[in-house]
Amino acid sequence: MKALTAGENFNVKIDIDNNGNSTAKQIRPDLHFGLAPATVDFEPYGPGLNINTITPDWKPTVSDLGPRGHTTIVSTTPMNFANDASVRDVIAGRTKFYIYGKIPYRDVLHLGHEFHFCFFYLQTPGIDPLSLLKCPSYNDTH
């Protein structure tokens, strides 16, 4: 991710790996973005998370991912922070910017499963200021 700037568009890429020994069928990524006060614990779709602030035009695809396969999903419409106040709050650590979602899929027996992911942007002294950190909950990533 590049530096946050009000009004400047950005896209998000999420890498997906199938670490299993069989094909994940009918994967349908569901990607969301949100802002929440840093003092609020993350809950997907929960209170305190303002998901209406950034609304991507996300058009999910349906596909299969073979065993030990890799793919990347990309937000299809650039997004931006509407104003400098939002950017300042995120950079100052008063607000967290979340990228989260789920990936439902079916296994070879046609049983349904769901993989969750969640990352947030947090500018921390001494750490790359443009990195995303893993959320402590709603996260099946390795």
Image: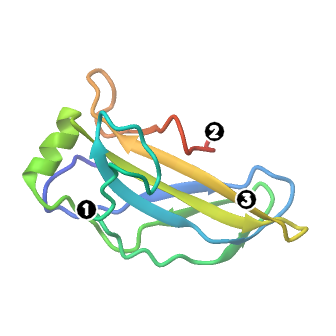
Which quarter of the figure has residue 52?
A: bottom left
Measuring from the top left, give residue 130's x and y in whole percent: 31, 40
Q: Earlier in the sequence, mark 1 or mark 2?
A: 1
Residue drawn at point x = 33 percent, y = 26 percent: 127
Callout 2, which amino acid? His
Measuring from the top left, give residue 97's x and y in whole percent: 31, 47
Instruction: Please give the residue where the numbered disc 3 appears in the rendered image.
Output: 69
Mark 3 Cα shell of 10 Å, populated few (<14), some (14-19), many (≥20): some
Callout 3, which amino acid? Gly
Q: Is residue 124 above or below residue 121?
A: above
* Front position in the image: 61 or 97: 97
Q: Is residue 125 above or below residue 3?
A: above
Q: Which mark is residue 53?
A: 1
Q: Which mark is residue 82?
A: none
Discs 3/1, front: 1
Q: Earlier in the sequence, mark 3 or mark 1?
A: 1
* Front position in the image: 137 or 80: 137
Measuring from the top left, give residue 84's x and y in whole percent: 8, 51
Instruction: Please give the residue where the numbered disc 2 appears in the rendered image.
Output: 142
